[in-house]
Structure formats: C-alpha cells, structure tokens
Image: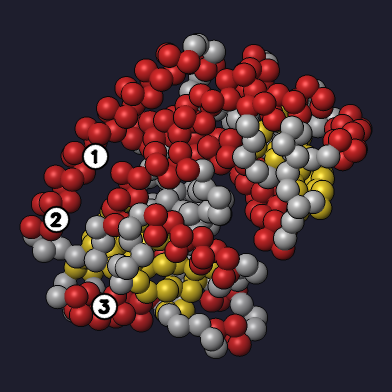
Amino acid sequence: MSTMEQVERAVLVGVIGSDRDEESMEELKDLAETAGAYVVGVVTQRRKGIDSAHYIGKGKLEELKAFIEANQVDVVIVNDELSGSQIKNIEDILGVKIVDRTCLILDIFARRARTKESKMQVELAQLKYRLPRLVGLGGQLSRLGGGIGTRGPGETKLETDRRHIQNRIKAIEKKLVKIERHRNLYRQRRAKNMVPVVSIVGYTNAGKSTLFNALTKAESYVEDKLFATLDTSARKLILPSGTHAVLVDTVGFIRDLPHDLVEGFKSTLEEVKYSDLLLHVIDITSPDIDEKIRVVEKVLSELDAIDIPRIDVFNKIDLIEDSSIVNNKQGIFISAKAGIGLDALKEAVERELAEKR
C-alpha cells in the first residue's frame, strides 16, 4: 500500500445461514485486510436468505447505521455479491461506500496484477462487473479519494456511457486473444519437444509460490497475503534422475471466486488444463481444509482439468502440533519454507510422469 494512501475503516456485514457462512466471514476479514482496510467491526444476521432490497433486515440496517456513526466507518464490506439496486438502496440509508465480496476480490486482483496481460484480465473482469451496476455504483464513483473498489480502470472510463465500456471490453478481449495465440504456439513447441508440464494449483495462500521457489530455486513473488501471485510463472524442474519438466505456478483459488474473474483469467488458467501432472498444494494447518479442497476441485472441474493426474501436497507440516492430523490423509507431506519432504515430492513427481509415458 502506498504511504500516501489513507487506510479505510471498514465494517464487515454478512448473512449467516450455515457454518460455511461463518468460515466465509473469517475469510472476508483476511480479504479486507489484504485490500488495505482496517476492520473495526463485524455485523451479522442469522436468516434463511438475503433481503432482496437491502441485503439485511431493516432493524439490523438501523443497528449497522448506528455502529457506522459511532465508529467513523468509511466503507461497508458485504459478504455476498450485490446488485446495483441493492448497492444504491443500502448506500442511500447508510451514507457510506458499499463494497461487495466480488468487488473486493477484484480490487485485490487489481493491486496484485503485474504483467500487461494480468492487468488487462483484471480490467476486463472489473468492467463486466461494473457494467450492469452503473446506477448503483454512481455514488461511490463520483466520490473523491478512491480507495477500495475504485482501483483498476480509472474514473474517467467508469463515468462514460454503457457503449464506451462495451467497446473497451471488446478491445481488451481482442488483445487477450492475440496473447493467447502466442501462448498456444509456445505450448505446441513444448509438446513437440516432449517436455512434461507440472502445474502447481491450490487455495490462495496455501504456499504455492514458496514451493515453486523451493523446487526451482527461482525468485517468484512470495508474500503471506491472499492472491500474492496472479501471473503464471514457468521454470525448469530438475528431477532426481536428471531429466527435467516445466513447473508452472498459478493464481490461487478461493470460494465464490467471481465468475467474470475466472472467465478473464481462463487463458492463463488454461495452462493447468494442458498439464501432465498437477500438484495440489494444501495448507494442512487450515481449520476448513476439506472445504478448501472442495473449492479447488470445483474450479478444476470448470477448467476441464479434474481428470489430470494429481498429487496432494500437504504443506506447512512443520507448523502442526497434533501429528494425528496426517493419519487419514493420502499424499506427500512437506514444508516448502523449511525444505522438509521436497526430495520425496520430486521422486513422486518422477514416478507419476513415468507412468504417463
């Protein structure tokens, strides 16, 4: 975050209908902090579904308004995707900026994008998100100061009419098609040379980039934050026998990943689909490990990559105190950071690739 950028005081709001929603609220806090917010409070309401007009009930909304006024809140972050009319309705009552979960994730992606391609992919997803919400987002786009939810495409782009945004979407899509053609040529060359491709996949912040660096001695960007890696990296992986493969690091997955973002990054994620082997990196210390595995498998299904041979790699083994956690899990147990289990992992990779030949 820039030192000149003001830290926004945020309150998190969510509707709780199951234990999964409770876990999702915890994740929302991590997302908000990754986006640079200071979380001053959490307001939840237990109900079967969201209110079609205001997301939460009128009484809870009044409670939220009082909290905002008492705690100098700048932004309300909602744990679901809202329509333009919902954003407008809530903002009219509360008088502060409203950011939904999708907008928050897009904002983080806008911060993390480093290459020209990933910047275009994020902008494309943001424009597709904002297009049907021009009315609801009008209030916050006209506000001075920017902040969460306003990064990426500049205000001038977003204040123009619908047709201009649609034209911008078409222009970005055209440029991304050209980049994809170059990637396909590179992929064909690799296949011709019979070099196997191993892709690292997993839930965000599971330690994929740390493992990538440990296996290849590369210096890929690593930070203990959600979505630290957006841009696909590829390096040579030398196997125990001296043969080599191409190791690919990919963007992390997350529950309720915005559809437009998956679509926007599909060309980058296609690398997964054409892999010979996947390394599914799993944070063994995570309390909702099974849910995160389910999310990753769901995204792999969407990418037509669920049937690719896969090794489950349980990371951060050095941080667990109860060794019985590993008893009912099949896979390789490592600590990418401490260098534990990496030789066993390389041997397992070589065995799997040998079976494919």
* Residue 41 percent coordinates (x, y): 82, 44
The amino acid at mark 2 is Arg
**Picture residue at 52% right of the left edge, 31% below the top:** 129
- Quickly name the residue at label 3: 352
Q: Which mark is residue 180?
A: 1
Q: Nearer the viewer, residue 249 or 291?
A: 291
Label 1: state its secondary structure.
helix
The amino acid at mark 1 is Glu
* Residue 114 percent coordinates (x, y): 40, 37
* Residue 181 percent coordinates (x, y): 19, 39
Label 3: state its secondary structure.
helix
Q: Which mark is residue 274?
A: none
Residue 71 appears in the picture as rendered: no
The amino acid at mark 3 is Glu
The residue positioned farthest toward the left in the image shown:
192
Q: Quadrant of residue 70?
A: top right
Q: Which mark is residue 190?
A: 2
Q: How far apart, in angstroms, are the residues tagged by discs 2 and 3?
A: 19 Å
Tell me which numbered mark, 2 or 3, is placed earlier along the sequence.
Answer: 2
Height in image: 159 above or below 281? above
Label 2: state its secondary structure.
helix
**Picture residue at 67% right of the left edge, 26% below the top:** 85
Q: How far apart, in angstroms, are the residues tagged by discs 3 and 1?
A: 29 Å
Tell me which numbered mark, 3 or 1, is placed earlier along the sequence.
Answer: 1
Height in image: 264 above or below 336? above
Marks 1/2 in contact by CB < 8 Å: the verdict is no
How many neighbours does mark 3 have within 10 angstroms: few (below 14), some (14-19), or many (20 or more)? some
